[in-house]
Image: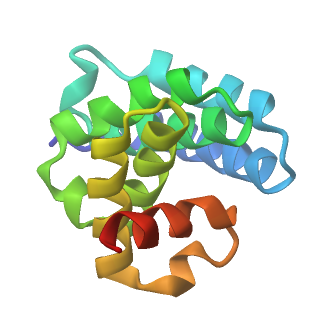
């Protein structure tokens, strides 16, 4: 993965910080607007830049927070396709597993939610709807 030139990196970091601030304020559309500006700033091929996977993850997360599960899944699927370390990231497994469950992709959901649980435990699920943790427990009974 490549790193950006200093001047471009400064613009990207500023927009990313603005997007994260909007995310924290639950202004997910605004966050995605800024993230898409970052996406547009990345030179082609975009997949070669370190920021690309981070962008996809955050765009997917914003879509999830807006109950736009199919859109979220598109971005999270690409994260997992392009970054083999995604399977070791509990949060990414959780979020993609949640989308899979919402989209009735139950086998994938169980695999990912179980992986998230194995990596981080019950604490990762504390701020999430109880149905996600219940789905793991029901499948293992």
Q: Residue at x 39, y 82 (%)?
A: 120
Task: Report the front residue among 138 and 132.
Answer: 138
* Quarter of the image where one finds residue 34: top right
Q: How is the image coloured?
A: rainbow
Q: Is residue 34 above or below residue 139?
A: above
Give the image quarter of residue 19: top right
Is residue 12 visible in the rendered structure shown here?
A: no
Q: With respect to residue 25, does 35 lie above or below?
A: above
Q: Is residue 17 above or below residue 66?
A: below
Q: Is residue 126 left or right of residue 46?
A: right
**Does 82 sit left or right of 105 as displayed?**
left
Residue 1 % position (x, y): 15, 43
Name which residue lies at 26% across and 56% down.
111
Is 23 displayed left or right of 130 in the figure? right
Query: Considering depth in this image, is 130 or 34 the residue closer to the camera?
Result: 130
Q: Residue at x 69, y 23 (%)?
A: 33
Q: Quadrant of residue 6?
A: top left
Q: Is residue 64 visible?
A: yes
Locate the C terminus by quadrant.
bottom left
**112 sits to left or right of 15:** left
């Amino acid at each position: 993965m490549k790193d950006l030139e200093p001047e471009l990196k400064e613009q990207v970091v500023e927009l990313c910080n603005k997007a994260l601030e909007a995310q924290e304020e639950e202004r997910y559309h605004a966050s995605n607007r800024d993230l898409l500006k970052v996406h547009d700033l990345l030179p082609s091929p975009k997949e070669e830049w370190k920021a690309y996977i981070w962008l996809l993850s955050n765009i997917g997360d914003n879509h999830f927070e807006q109950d736009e599960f199919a859109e979220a899944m598109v971005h999270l699927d690409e994260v997992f396709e392009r970054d083999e370390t995604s399977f070791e990231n509990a949060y990414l497994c959780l979020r993609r597993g949640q989308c899979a469950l919402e989209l009735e992709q139950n086998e994938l959901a169980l695999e990912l939610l179980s992986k998230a649980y194995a990596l981080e435990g019950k604490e990762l699920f504390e701020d999430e709807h109880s149905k996600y943790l219940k789905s793991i427990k029901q499948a293992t009974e």
